[in-house]
Image: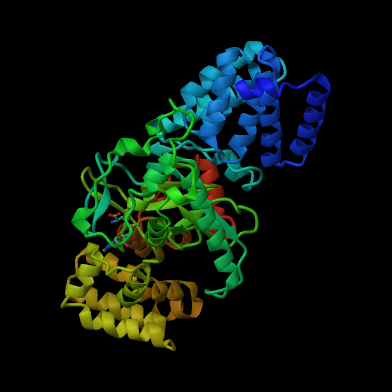
Amino acid sequence: MAAAAMDGLDEESLQELRSRATRLLLKEDWEGYAAVCSRIVHGAAAADRRVLCSALAHRADARARLGDRPGALADCDAALAADPAHPAALLAKGALLRGLGRYALAADCLRAALPAGAGGADEAREMLEQCRRLEAQARSGAVDLSDWVLAGFSGKCPDLAEYVGPVEVRRSAHGGRGVFAVKGVEAGATLMISKAVATGRGVIPDAADSDEKMVVWKDFVDKVLDAAERCPRTASLIYTLSTGEEQEDELALPDMAVFKPESEDLSDGVPEAGIGTREALDVDRIMKVLDVNCLTEDAPSANLLGSNGIVNCGVGLWILPSFLNHSCHPNARRTHVGDHAIVHASRDIKAGEEVTFPYFDVLTPAGKRREAARAWGFECRCDRCRFEAEDAVLRQEHVRSENELVNGGVDMGALVVRLEDKMRKSMVKERRKAFVRASFWSAYSSLFDNGRLMRKWGRKVPGEAVIAESVAGAVGGSESVLRAMLRGADNGNGCGNRLEVEDKVVRIGRATYGKVVKRQAMRALFRLTLEGDNSKSL
Ligand SMILES: C[S@@+](CC[C@H](N)C(=O)[O-])C[C@H]1O[C@@H](n2cnc3c(N)ncnc32)[C@H](O)[C@@H]1O
């Protein structure tokens, strides 16, 4: 502050800087705004505590918007050291702590801001309410998106807290590390909620290698590097992820505590020397991590609730979900809500069982899934792939049916009837039948969708709801399986009495979307599923 005192501002210069700051604020030029605030901070006479604290609080706000949370926190703390009841500094610190997922600490600041700040009291009250709600959600993982769903996903998508449920990272037979349930969970239960390190989104024409896709990707990579540069915790979390080059047993098992917001050390707001610059990052390593761990929001395996504007391409990095391995017999799914990924159980999961979600569409035959896994850079070691590779009884039938599907021009009803006959005669167990039906789901769907084929073959195959229930046993919930269940439930279906069928529909609904809505909103999701409205869900 010695230099600051020398730059002491007279009243006129201070007014001039304030007007300039207002103009920059209106233009949302946060860099410029922070720079002007810095001039005021340095020029404020040591005696003028009021001016100094306001300038620090405003700079904190600008720094937070620029993603410099440590700098913003340091500003708030400096202002509060000078005036512990400064309302704008308390409000700014409350907002920052809320953004860092430290809801109880944020609530303390906001409560302190209430009596002091007549101006920001409403804002403080509203944030306090949010903090209470988010703190409860961060503890229980219970999410309720009913209002948003019933409002047709209009308006801002709901703010969510990060949540780490009953899961742990352990060694996996699938490859390297994986996520395991530490207690039994039922289908629909939330397992984790993770905020993206960064996402990239855009409207892309269909071409797979389009330049536009490259632009989205480059923008996304830049955002990831920015986030890592600004926050040491983010950088160290990214370094826990696999680059795909390590020996599997070399990959360290992270302590689950690192995934909780509390793991961030807030005690020193100013970053250590070296951190906070691009040079301090291992950019090469981060690029490899992105190759192995990025998830796309438009994958058939992910729900994208809400239309997120007119976006048809989304990619992101979510840390804890990156530890989940793929399986073609998955027991979890993810739903994207804004920048948050909610991972929920899509089948009942036993304590100690590995949690897996599908990286790509698993309602396809073995050959197609093999290609998809190779595009991801691995050979799938899941139990369904192993079963299909080893199955002597059905191997020929698999190959023949897959060839027919690939070559087209075949009567799907005949294909399905042949598969069902073969499985009945060979007394294939229910679980394995479910795998086969999942692999040839497109043939079953074409049959059920086609009135003429149904009149010809319908009596020789189990009802649509029976098949849907069986396939849900193999792949958990999925929009297309749910659609079949909903349609099948309306017809005479051999799937139980009305109450039983309703119960099954709700179970598959929960397995598909997770327990994120109440019954009434679930019905709205069912309507969208039946209409196949992909702009709202999938
Ligand atoms: C997003 S990471 C999953 C976590 C990773 N296993 C780890 O230890 O960090 C994706 C990588 O895990 C491995 N993997 C995931 N699912 C697999 C599967 N079903 N079979 C074989 N390897 C799998 C592959 O090496 C893949 O590139």
The one nearer the camera, 460 or 487, is 487
Q: Quadrant of residue 90?
A: top right
Does residue 137 show up?
A: yes
Does residue 117 show up?
A: no
Q: Please tell me in which quarter of the rendered image ligand 1 is found.
A: bottom left
The one nearer the camera, 13 or 374, is 13
Q: Is residue 75 left or right of residue 241?
A: right
* Residue 363 in the image, given as x and y percentages of width and height: 38, 68
Q: How many marks?
A: 0
Whether residue 463 is situated above or below residue 192 in the rendered picture: below
Q: Is residue 203 left or right of residue 450?
A: right
Instruction: Tell me the residue at 47%/32% (across/down).
Output: 101
Q: Is residue 398 left or right of residue 13?
A: left
Instruction: Tell me the residue at 46%/62% (across/down).
Output: 299
The one nearer the camera, 130 or 270, is 270
* Residue 310 in the image, given as x and y percentages of width and height: 65, 58
Q: Quadrant of residue 444?
A: bottom left
* Residue 467 in the image, given as x and y percentages of width and height: 35, 65
The one nearer the camera, 201 or 475, is 201
Q: Quadrant of the N terminus?
A: top right
Instruction: Tell me the residue at 42%/61% (across/down).
Output: 481
* Residue 108 in the image, given as x and y percentages of width and height: 51, 17
